[in-house]
Amino acid sequence: MSSSLFPPAEHPAARSQAPSSVVMVRPHNFRPNPITIADNAFQSRAPQEAPDVVARAAHREVSTVAERLEAVGVAVHLFDDIGDDLPDSVFPNNWFSTHEDGRVALYPMYSPNRRGERRQDVVTMLRDRFRITAVHDYSVLEDEEVFLEGTGAMVMDHVHRVAYISRSYRANERAVSQVCRDLGYLPTVFATTDQRGIAIYHTNVMMSVGTTMALVGLETIPDLEERRRIERQLHDTGHTIVPLTHEQIDDFAGNAIEVQGTDGRYLVMSARAHASLSTAQERAIAQHATILSVPVPTIELAGGSIRCMIAGIHLPQRPAPFHDAVPLQASQEPLPSS
């Protein structure tokens, strides 16, 4: 694919792939979601510990990730969850995304007990501290059983305006077409399977696209022509590919996110994911970013890892005094259901 299809990196609406500000949600009633286990092969069926022990451990893990990010200069806007029946509230990247032209998108969620995760207080914080030009609310598509779970379902190259999408129930192609058209991304859709032959539920489990590097589970793309297409597209947009094996995907090595810290870019991943990397892979990554790994074994019981826990803020900053990096707490205001 010719690189002429992609906007140049200095495109005014797409200057940064690595966010320096993020949103996280600290859970109080975390548990693996019984509704999502049907199509999430990465999810554990039942924790061995008592529910209150699991919930406290998840709370600590999110707090630790937030502290580690802030220590390297990433602004973390940390919200506490708002309800008793929101087991996956720790994964805010599924219900909203932000973009450097000032757009915010709210997404239709596959599981009914995840739809309450959409929150007006998060959107209000974004309006107060960043420049927003439009809010696109696609949640009404849930009424038609059409779903697209944000940057879980779409791995977005914000610099070159490409959205990589693995086919699944959580990435309806009609929604993909509408969202990519509205937000100005080129959709790149392909099929994936894990080593058990099961379709991978979210693209961001098998793929992470940074500024100049991409971790990709190429083995999960069974169609060789589609695999070559993904490789070619990443190459044409200036990315060094670090291939991941099926086993590393199972260890969440693909579920990483690049962020911008005070002293450079960091690739944030779980300790389990980091341990799965070879020395050669670590060296390849080090040419592009510093690995920042944090143990989140409790969160990973729910079938997601570090990337799922972090919603990057790509919006332009408001002038001072609005752009301070003081973390916010939740206001108990859920978005009205559509």
Image (spheres, rainbow, N blue to C red):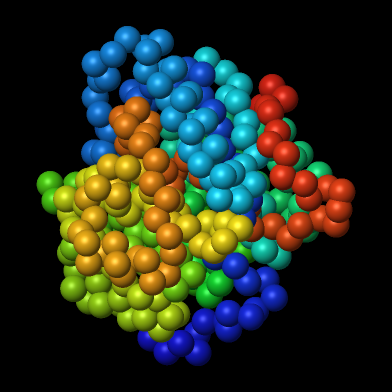
Relative to 41, 97 lies left or right: right
| Residue 146 seen in this snapshot | no
| Residue 268 seen in this snapshot | yes
Residue closer to the observer: 117 or 213: 213
Residue closer to the observer: 131 or 110: 131
Quadrant occupied by the N terminus: bottom left
- Residue 181: x and y in percent read 58, 67
- Residue 248: x and y in percent read 21, 52
Residue closer to the observer: 113 or 155: 155
- Residue 158: x and y in percent read 55, 67
For the point 76% across and 57% down, the residue is: 317
- Residue 304: x and y in percent read 36, 39
Quadrant occupied by the C terminus: top right
For the point 69% across and 22% down, the residue is: 332
For the point 29% across and 47% down, the residue is: 273
Up/down of 132 relative to 3, above or below: above
Q: How many marks can you see?
A: 0
Relative to 185, 268 lies left or right: left
Relative to 117, 248 lies left or right: left
For the point 44% across and 64% down, the residue is: 289
